[in-house]
Image (spheres, helix red, strand yellow):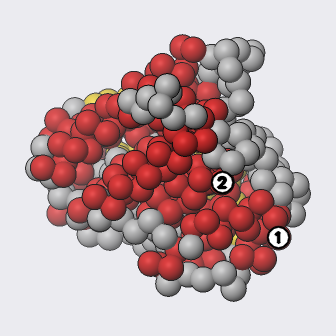
Amino acid sequence: MIGFEYYNPAKIIFGEGSEKKIKDLLESYNVKSLLLVYSGDFVKTLGIFDVIADAVGELGIGFIENGEVTPNPSIDLVRSLVEEGRKKDVDFVLAVGGGSSIDTAKAVALGIPYEGDVWDFFEKGVSPSKVLPVGVIATTASSGSETSNCAILSNGQWKLGFEDDRIIPKFAIMNPAFTAGLPSYQTFAGTADVLSHLLERYFSDERNSDTTDYLIEGAVKALLLNTERLLKDQKDINARGEIQWLASVAYNNFLDAGRRADWGSHRIEHELSAQYNITHGEGMAVVMTAWIRYVADIKPWRPALLATRVFGVDAFDHDERERALILADRLEDLFRKTGLKTRLHELGIDDRDFDVMAERATRNGSVGHYEPLDKEAFKKVLTLAL
């Protein structure tokens, strides 16, 4: 078990009607000028917009809004919002939605006080001297960005992340009822995203981190159980609540304690979604199973352990390689059952851009920690995903 530091100050307000706490929360942060960031009309149809508008009106807070966020959020919108936020003296950014809206809000919170271009944080790793506070009303169960220290942005065919504890949201409001109207595809792309975050943390080369191992295994079991419940009834509010909470648990870094997570599969998917603008959760369903099949021939012990402890694959009847491959098959079956594609060719993707993506991803060296991937290994995983 390796040494670690854990810090996460996000306040979580969970449950039915939790959005009604927004007035008290904004008042506690002495907000004077609020920027609301979201995507589409759902904020208004769910009644969230009215709750926010009433709160800022009663508190006399300046208020501007933007509902133009798209999946795989772009630096262009962030730059525009930074400029507008400066003109309006914005001192608090509120995101409503999923990971795209939240990461946009985080980037804007970085950019408004910064004199340079906000992309500097993502491309050059500039350390911010000041960050505006961010709050979140989560309406999906997927990215977990509502309590994380990370933001992901796209700039053309570059999709990069930035991590800093100062962009952890001050609060995250989670009302599972807001996720009940999500289309089936978005619901299960979300569960795949949550699972990928758990697996990235599980696939560590640290052999002595039993507490975190069992916590992750328990979280995976809870996710599988509640995914099955949603397959039977997508209006099951208890299952949606469990998965929304799991999304945060999977990505708030608590499950990194005592170990170093992998994240190689995410680097592969980020290249795919930058190149082809695919949905991240579905992309992870494709990549994660291919990655497991790749490491089955090189370093199978971690996937094999998960196969035995979570899926009950007998270690007496199957060696580590066989158990790892069975795990990949079980996961692919699960993803297909939820209606997701699991192969690149199903997404209309062939191997023509493999070199470009691999070169871009490994420009600063290998990616991933459990089994580092150089350019050639990166392409091998992509080939297995075809």
Q: Position of residue 51 (x, y in %)?
A: 22, 49
The residue labelled by disc 1 is: 359
Q: Earlier in the sequence, mark 2 or mark 1?
A: 2
Residues 197 and 350: in front is 350
The residue labelled by disc 2 is: 294
Quarter holding the C terminus is bottom right
Residue at (31% x, 39% y) in the render: 224
In the image, 301: left or right of 225? Answer: right
Vertical comparison of 264 with 182: above or below: above
Q: Position of residue 352 (x, y in %)?
A: 69, 85
Mark 1: few, some, or many residues within 10 Å (few <14, many ≥20)? some
In the image, 159: left or right of 104? Answer: right
Quarter holding the N terminus is top right
Quarter of the figure with residue 101: bottom left
2 or 1: mark nearer the eye: 2
The kind of secondary structure element at disc 2 is helix
The answer to whether residue 82 is visible is no
Residues 139 and 357: in front is 357
The answer to whether residue 350 is visible is yes
